Image (cartoon, rainbow, N blue to C red):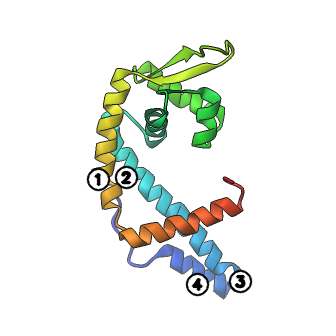
Amino acid sequence: MPSPLPRDPIAQARDQWIAHGWGAEADSMAAITAIMRTASIFLQRADAILKPHGLTFARFEVLALLGFSKRGSLPMNHASQLLQVHATSLTNSVDRLEATGLVRRIPHPTDGRTRLLELSGEGKRVLFNARQDLNEQLFSNSGMPEADARTLFQILSRFRHSQGDFL
């Protein structure tokens, strides 16, 4: 990780936005840029925690989704919708998870055109351990007070809802 900068570059960019006559847009630019930078920081932390498990955060999300499913399996297209990723991205993640024996594609019992994703026993073990590490090293140690995390989630949920991300 690089050493901290002496001043917030996003705050500097905001000041420059204002100085160049874009004051009306400055706060939104700063907020959006800060969200993207924050997402990058958290993704880097998550990927570093998951690397010893042979996972990226994207692959962990697939395992977690399957781990939460009622039947222990999901159709590929449904998993793609719930993860909010394009089917091609999901296929790439599933290919890698399948190659390492963590998931398998199985035939759908009533629809011959559909394949189900299912966690293997090893996938369940890796998911359990990876989830433990994420909870201990990231989620319980996020650097945000609980009330701030809750407020931020509520703000971002309202925004996502207003943008049609969910009903």
The answer to the question of whether label 4 and label 3 lie on touching residues, with beta carbons closer than 8 A, is no
Sequence-wise, the earlier of marks 1 and 3 is 3
The answer to the question of whether label 3 and label 2 lie on touching residues, with beta carbons closer than 8 A, is no
Question: x%, y% of residue 107?
Answer: 58, 13
Sequence-wise, the earlier of marks 4 and 3 is 4
Cα distance, mark 3 to mark 2? 33 Å
Sequence-wise, the earlier of marks 1 and 4 is 4
Which SS class for mark 4? helix
For label 2, the residue is 45
Q: Nearer the viewer, mark 4 or mark 3?
A: 3
Sequence-wise, the earlier of marks 3 and 2 is 3
Disc 3: CA contacts within 10 A as few (<14), some (14-19) or many (>=20): few
For label 4, the residue is 15
Q: Nearer the viewer, mark 1 or mark 2?
A: 1
For label 1, the residue is 137
Cα distance, mark 1 to mark 2? 9 Å
Q: Kindly identify the amino acid type of the residue bearing the numbered disc 1.
A: Gln
The answer to the question of whether label 1 and label 2 lie on touching residues, with beta carbons closer than 8 A, is yes
Sequence-wise, the earlier of marks 2 and 4 is 4
Figure quadrant of residue 148: bottom left
Q: Kindly identify the amino acid type of the residue bearing the numbered disc 3.
A: Ala
Cα distance, mark 4 to mark 3? 12 Å
For label 3, the residue is 24
Q: Looking at the image, is 51 positioned above or below residue 75?
A: below
The answer to the question of whether label 1 and label 4 lie on touching residues, with beta carbons closer than 8 A, is no
